[in-house]
Image (spheres, rainbow, N blue to C red):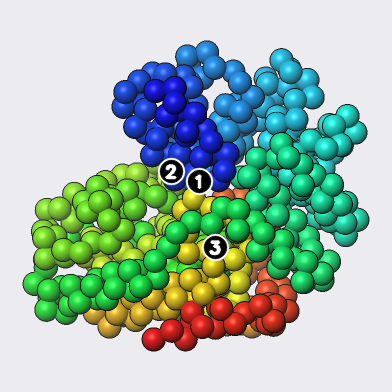
Amino acid sequence: MQQRAREGHRLFAEGRTREALAIYRELQTLAPDHPGVNTMLGMCLAAISNHKAALVPLQRAYAAGVRAPDLITTFAVSLRNLGRFDEAERMLDELLARQPGDPGALAAKSDLYYFIGQPERAIGVLEPGLEANPRDHALILAYCRAATTEAQRLRAVELARSVEADADLPPRRRALLHFRTGPHLDKLKRYDEAFESFRKGHAIVREAWDPAAHRALVAEVIAKWSPNVIGAIQPARQQTPRPVFIVGMPRSGTTLIEQIIDAHPKAFGAGELQFLHGMVFEMTRTPYLLDPAALKRPVLERLGSRYLGAVAELAPRDVERVTDKAPLNFRNVGLIALMFPGARIIHARRDPRDTCLSCFFQWLAGYFPQGHDLEHLGRFHTDHERLMDHWKRVFPGRVLDVLYEDVVDDLEGQTRRILEFIGLEFDPRCLRFWETGRVATTSSNDQVRQPLYKSSVARHQRYRAYLDPLIRGLEAP
C-alpha cells in the first residue's frame, strides 16, 4: 500500500492527475478511513475541479485530525469553488493562527479574495509573505493570479521567471506557473513570449487523446440516435421548462450567456453542474449514451426527478428558470431532450479559432486532454459541431444557437432573443449583468464582472503565426 501511495504522490506531482486519482480510489477501497489516502484523494478530485466530490474525503481526513497545510488549503479551495466563501476564509484564518505566515495559506487566501473580486486585497495579503520568502513558489503563483495592473503584471512575469528553473519546483506547479505567466505576457502584448509560455505548460502536463477514435465515437452516436430510434422512445411526461442547458465548446461564451440570464429576477445561474455527467456515467460507463433504444420512460422520469431534486437544493424556490452551463453537455443533448421535453437548450458558439486558442490558453489539465494540442482542439471542435448539427436535426426547435460575436455587437437584441427562447420577459437588468455581484466559478470569472468588451473578438489574429496546426484540425475531413 505504501508503494502504491508513493506512486500516486509522484504522479500527482507530475501533473498526471487522472492516473493518481485511480490509484487513490483503489487505495480508499482498501482503507476507506486512512487519513493520508483521503487527503490525497481529495486533492486529486479538487485538481480536476470536482470540488463537491473532493469535500467527502477531505472532510474524512479533517475529522480524523489531519491539519496539514495542504489539506486545509485544498479544503478551502473546494469550499471557495462551491461558493462557501465564509467557511473557506475561516478555515484559512485558523491555519494562519496556528502557523503565521504559512505560504500556502496566504496564497489560498489571496486566491479567495481574487475570486470574489477583490484583487488589491489579494495582492496585499501576499506582500508580507513575498518580502520574507521572495522565491516561494506558492506565493508567486498566487501573485501571478492576482496581478491586474501593468506594473503588477511586469512584476508577476519577473517573479515567475526567477523560479521557473528551480530544481525543487514540482512539474505540476512548473506547468501552472507557465499558464499563469502567459496571460500577463498577452496583456503586455508580448505575444510570442505568451504563446511559448502556454506551449511549455502543455508540454509538461500533456495527456494522450486519440482524435480518430473520438471521431468514430461521434459517428456511432449519430448513427444510433437516428430519427427512427428517437421516434420510438417515449419521452418523460415531465414538461417543466425550469432547467435551461447552455452547451458548447469550453471558452465559447457559456458563462456570458449564463450571467445575462442570471441577472433576470426570475432566473438563477447554477454554474457548471456535474449531476448529468454523473448519471450518464452510472448508466453507460462511457462519455456517451450508445444505446438510446434502452431508454424507457420510467428511467427518464427517475433521472429527471433526481436532477430536479439536486437543482432544487441550489436554486431559490421562486425562480422560474435555472441554468446549467456545463459546456460538454453537448454530448448529452439527446438525453436532455427526452428527459425534459419542456426544457430549452442554448448552444454557445464563437469563432472556432478564438474558441480553440482560448482553450489552449487555459489550465485544463486532468479533464480536457484534447486541450494540450491545437490540432486536437480543432478536430474536437469539428466533432462537436457535427454532433450539435445532428441534435438540431433530430430535435428541431429545441436548440438555440447564440454567437458570442453577435452578443458583443448587439447585446440587447441577443438578450431579448435568448429570453424569448427560454420563456422569460425582457428585463433591462440583464443588460448590466456585471452589476449582480455574482461570482462565476470558472476561468471566465474575472471577465464577467466587467462590462462587455470586444477585445476577445478575433483574438486569434495576434497568434496567426502559430495556428497552422489548429487550421489543419478544423479542416480535417
Residue at numbered disc 2: 19
Disc 1 designates what residue?
Answer: 16
Name which quarter of the figure residue 243 lies in: bottom left
Of labels 3 and 2, earlier in sequence is 2
- In front of the other: 241 or 156: 156
* Residue 315: % across, % down: 44, 47
Q: Which residue is mark 3?
A: 372
| Tag 3: amino acid | His
Height in image: 291 above or below 126? below
Q: CA distance from mark 3 to mark 2?
A: 17 Å
Q: Taking 299 as reference, is 255 left or right?
A: right
**Percent x, y of residue 154:** 88, 56
Residue 474 in view (yes/no): yes
Label 2 secondary element: helix
Distance Cα–Cα, label 1 vs label 3: 13 Å
- Amino acid carrying label 1: it is Arg
